[in-house]
Image: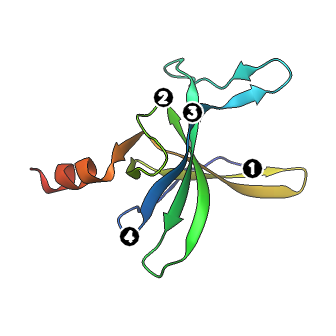
Amino acid sequence: MRNIPIPVDVARLQFICVKAPCPRIVNKETGELKTDKASGQTVYEVLFSVEDTFGKIELVKIGVVGEPPVAPGNEVKPVGLVGYVWELSGRWGIAYRASALLPAAAATVEARGV
């Protein structure tokens, strides 16, 4: 299966952090952490409650390079959010990755150019 990134429009979604960032573990037996191939930095996973404009809520894990300054309860706007479809042993899903996680207020100000 080809791994083509699918861009996600976050404009109409609200992301609330529900669990503090933690390094993504590749091998539970050895404790090996996932690292970004380009930078060599550790990849962190953050669990979010994501609500759309219709009030539908989903729990979503988002991967990001480097430890983001996010805590449970913070509203965040992911930058450059993409989804990757994966399949393994008949199971499939979507893995999400962002280039950065910004506080929602800062992202709003940045979008307006203030």
The residue that mark 2 highlights is 67
Residue at the limit of the structure toward the front, as seen here:
73
The amino acid marked with disc number 4 is Arg
Q: Which residue is more in the foreground, 89 or 31?
A: 31
Q: Which of pointers 2 and 3 lies earlier in the amino acid sequence? A: 3
Decide: few, some or many residues near mark 3? Use Cα within 10 Å; few <14, some 14-19, many ≥20: many
The amino acid marked with disc number 2 is Glu
Decide: few, some or many residues near mark 4? Use Cα within 10 Å; few <14, some 14-19, many ≥20: few
- What label sits on residue 44 in the rendered view? 3
Q: Is residue 18 above or below residue 49?
A: above
Decide: few, some or many residues near mark 2? Use Cα within 10 Å; few <14, some 14-19, many ≥20: some
Q: Is residue 1 above or below residue 64?
A: below
Real-space CA distance between mark 1 and mark 3, rounded to the nearest whole angstrom: 25 Å
* Residue occupying the point 82% across, 17% down: 30
Q: Which residue is more in the foreground, 109 or 4?
A: 109
Instruction: Report which quarter residue 90 is drawn in.
Output: bottom right
Real-space CA distance between mark 4 and mark 2, rounded to the nearest whole angstrom: 25 Å
Q: Which of pointers 4 and 1 lies earlier in the amino acid sequence? A: 1
Instruction: Report which quarter residue 15 is drawn in.
Output: bottom left
Real-space CA distance between mark 4 and mark 1, rounded to the nearest whole angstrom: 30 Å
Q: Is mark 1 in CB contact (under 8 Å) with mark 3?
A: no
The residue that mark 1 highlights is 1
Q: Is residue 68 above or below residue 96?
A: above
Q: Is residue 64 above or below residue 82?
A: above
The residue that mark 4 highlights is 12
Real-space CA distance between mark 1 and mark 2, rounded to the nearest whole angstrom: 30 Å
